[in-house]
Image (spheres, grey):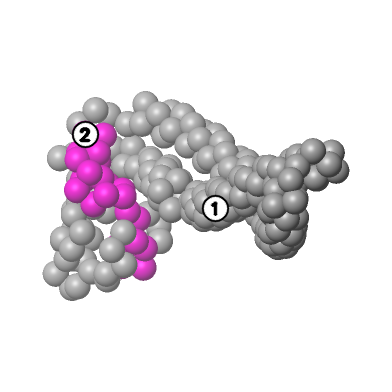
Amino acid sequence: MKADHFEQQKLLELAAEDVALTQLAHRRRTLPEGVAVETAAEAERALTDDVVRAETAARDLQREVKRLEADVETVRARAAKDQKLLDSGSVSAKQMTDLQHELESLARRQSDLEDQELELMESLETAEAALREAQAGRDEARAARERAEELRDDALADITDGTNRHEAARAAVAGGISAPLLALYDRIRTQTGTTGAAMLKARQCQGCRIELNGRELAAVRNADPHEVVRCENCGRILVRTAESGL
């Protein structure tokens, strides 16, 4: 294939835009800010689980406290009823003795229940403190995740802006290159995954960084300036300039 020598040099501008676009695409795939969001989100999920466990523990203790409070109230009501009956003087001596025994038993029962209630209240206080701590940790993690998302979104916006600029610049350069040469370049670019052309500088292909051997160099040196020559190692179009060392 033949193409104007100066038109071939435009391929270097095209390649520069493709390198920039490749770098931006790589940055998007490996964005550190994206990893930071995932890490922050995982921390938030773990702390949210801690909150759920702490809430469950506190609710269970609250139910136990209410149950004991109800039991204590039942015992108190029964004791008050017995005491009222005892004070009425309307019971027999045997009933009086039985009521006194029952009041003693109820007093012991009430004391035991109140001791249990006190222990549970202390446990509940500890559980509620743990819940508040877990909630604070979760809230901090949520704020950290939101900050990480903002940084990620800013970075993505910057990448998108850069991509749009380089795509526009690439389209402008491509518009000045003939269709056959552009098609060849794009085909090679697809194969290499980066660019379809590279400068020949100091006898070295700047695409694969391999220096041309004597035979290859002679072939390029003797080729028509308008002949499209390619690197035998990477397949890229070799663009000859005053720095080629020919």
Residue in the picture at 40% in, 57% down: 242
Q: Quadrant of the N terminus?
A: top left
Residue 237, percent from left and from top = 24, 50
| Image position of 208 (left or right of 61) | left
Residue 170, percent from left and from top = 41, 34
Taking depth in this image into account, of 184 and 138 the one nearest to the observer is: 138
**What is the secondary structure assignment of the residue under circle 2?**
helix
Query: Decide: marks 1, 2 in contact (CB < 8 A)?
Result: no
Range of magenta residues: 181-206
Q: Amino acid at mark 2?
A: Ala
- Does residue 157 lie above or below 42 as drawn? above
Question: Which residue bears the numbered disc 1?
Answer: 53
- As drawn, the label of residue 183 is 2
Badge 2, how many Cα within 10 Å: few under 14, some, many 20+?
A: few
Q: Is residue 202 visible?
A: yes
Residue in the picture at 28% in, 63% down: 208
Taking depth in this image into account, of 115 and 13 the one nearest to the observer is: 115
- As drawn, the label of residue 185 is none
Residue in the picture at 79% in, 38% down: 90
**What is the secondary structure assignment of the residue under circle 1?**
helix
Taking depth in this image into account, of 64 and 33 the one nearest to the observer is: 64
Q: Earlier in the sequence, mark 1 or mark 2?
A: 1
Magenta stretch containing residue 186, yes or no? yes
| Image position of 41 (left or right of 19) | right
| Image position of 100 (left or right of 159) | right
Residue in the picture at 27% in, 29% down: 178
Taking depth in this image into account, of 82 and 160 the one nearest to the observer is: 82
* Tag nearer the camera, 1 or 2: 1
